[in-house]
């Protein structure tokens, strides 16, 4: 699985956007080829992926919100899975 370093600045790729689907009552990542349904946690992570924050900053923000949870591992795993689909990239590149 692809893995972003802690200094990477993840952002959604051009042509994709995160939105709330009122009909399904679920967050959705819209991409040119379709849509990816997201759980609340995945949506929270991706909302922080603006290209301005590093992965370490995203993890720190979520650790503050969810103390004691294995946030770092979960963030890295989610970003790796989304990156393998070509839906997120490092804004520095």
Image (cartoon, helix red, strand yellow):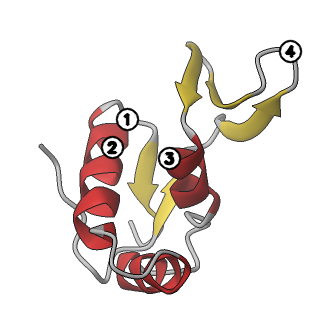
Q: Nearer the viewer, mark 3 or mark 2?
A: 3
In the picture, residue 32 is in which quadrant? top right
> Which residue does the numbered mark 4 point to in the structure image?
23
Cβ atoms under marks 2 and 1 closer than 8 Å: yes
Looking at the rendered structure, the secondary structure element under dot 4 is loop
Name the mark nearer the viewer: 4 or 2: 4
In 3D space, how far apart are the residues under numbered discs 4 and 2 (Cα atoms)? 27 Å
**View extreme (left): residue:** 1
Question: If you read the primary sequence from the N terminus, does the residue marked by circle 1 or circle 3 appear first?
Answer: 3
Q: Are marks 4 and 1 in contact (CB under 8 Å)?
A: no
- Mark sitting earlier along the chain (4/2): 4
- Distance CA(mark 4)–CA(mark 3): 19 Å
Residue 54 - label: none
Residue 50 versus residue 83 in the image, above or below: below
Callout 1: SS? loop
Label 3: element kind: helix
Location of mark 3 (residue): 42
- Quadrant of the image for the N terminus? top left
Q: Position of residue 68 (x, y in %)?
A: 33, 79
First in residue order: circle 4 vs circle 1 = 4
x and y percent of residue 60 in the render? 43, 86
Q: Residue at x 33, y 43 (%)?
A: 83
- Marked residue nearer the N-terminal end (3 or 2): 3
Q: Measured along the vertical axis of the image, is residue 21 above or below residue 93?
A: above
Q: What separation in Å lies between label 2 and label 1 (alpha carbons)?
A: 5 Å
**Residue topped by disc 2:** 83
Q: Residue at x 78, y 25 (%)?
A: 25
């Amino acid at each position: 699985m692809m893995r972003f370093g802690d200094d990477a600045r993840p952002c959604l790729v051009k042509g994709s956007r995160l939105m709330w689907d009122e009909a399904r009552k679920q967050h959705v990542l819209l991409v040119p080829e379709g849509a990816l349904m997201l759980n609340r946690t995945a949506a929270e992570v991706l909302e922080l992926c603006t290209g301005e924050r590093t992965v370490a900053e995203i993890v720190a923000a979520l650790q503050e919100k969810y103390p004691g949870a294995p946030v770092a591992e979960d963030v890295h795993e989610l970003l790796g899975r989304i990156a393998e689909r070509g839906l997120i990239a490092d804004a520095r590149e």
